[in-house]
Image (cartoon, grey):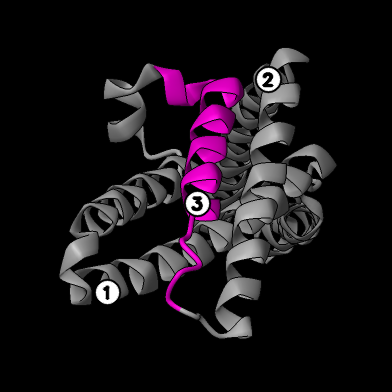
Amino acid sequence: MARDIEKGDASQPLANTATTSSSNTTGNNTRIRAKPDPILATCRCFSLVTVLASILCIVVNVISAVRSFRNVSDIFDGIFRCYAVGIAIFVIVAETEWSFIIKFWKVLEYWAGRGMLQIFVAVMTRAYPEVYGERHEVLLLRDIASYTLLSCGLIYVISGVLCIGFLKRARQNKAITTQQAIKDLEDLERRRAELEALLIVDNP
């Protein structure tokens, strides 16, 4: 009887310790959060604006290509617009920073290279002919698309010269490392809680 009492007294602090550790683990899991990087958030927003401007350029160039092909005498302008659409799509893909594209087009890893490509698309879009009597809405869309993408391209070039792209990549690597460290820590805490639960079962 005395031994049972002693076992009960000995297991009680162990259970309390395990319970406290489990609660601390839960609290730690709740508190562990990676702080959002303002530089990366700004770059994502800017990339979104660039993508939207590229999509507008695609729309404008598609409209121009369709009208050029309808007018057989302007078929070369239609071919020119098709190239503009293709390059604009490539600009959008570059903004996703897809590793497959970056692997074969290293120049797109650098912001100055992306900026010059965007400026080229903006210039091609601004060359939209005005001989067909287009509506004011189409011309307005052309101006908005071309000048917006031109501004994005200039900002990219200037930022590339100032090495902002290198700073962004360094922040991205740091964020990835932090996320991996948080994941590993959460796995360790979860494993610790499981082992403590098994310890309580083994010591009733």
Q: Are marks 3 and 1 in contact (CB under 8 Å)?
A: no
Q: Residue at x 15, y 68 (%)?
A: 72
- The answer to whether one can see residue 62 in this image is yes
Q: Earlier in the sequence, mark 2 or mark 3?
A: 3
Q: Nearer the viewer, mark 1 or mark 2?
A: 1
Q: Give left or right: position of 127 versus 164.
A: left
Magenta segment range?
Answer: 107-132
Q: Label 2 neighbourhood size at 10 Å, few (<14), some (14-19), many (20+)?
A: some
Q: Position of residue 79 (x, y in %)?
A: 22, 53
Q: Say which quadrant the C terminus sits in.
A: bottom right
Q: Amino acid at mark 1?
A: Val
- Binning the other alpha carbons within 10 Å of mark 3 as few (below 14), some (14 to 19) or many (20 upward) gives some
- Going 78% across and 15% down the picture, which residue do you hit? 162
Q: Nearer the viewer, mark 2 or mark 3?
A: 3
In this view, the residue farthest toward the left is: 72
Residue 118 drawn above or below residue 145: above
* Dot label at residue 189: none
Q: Secondary structure at mark 3?
A: loop
Residue 127, label in figure: 3
Looking at the rendered image, the quarter that the N terminus falls into is: bottom right
Q: Secondary structure at mark 2?
A: helix
- Residue indicated by mark 1: 66
Amino acid carrying label 2: it is Gly
As for residue 142 lying within the magenta part, the answer is: no
Q: Eyeballing the image, is 122 above or below 77?
A: above
Q: Indicate left or right for 37 with 125 as reference.
A: right
Instruction: Determine crowd level at label 1: few under 14, some 14-19, many 20+ residues with C-alpha closer than 10 A.
Output: some
Magenta-colored segment: predominant secondary structure: helix
Mark 2, residue position: 160
Q: CA distance from mark 1 to mark 2?
A: 36 Å
Q: x and y percent of residue 19 in the render? A: 75, 61
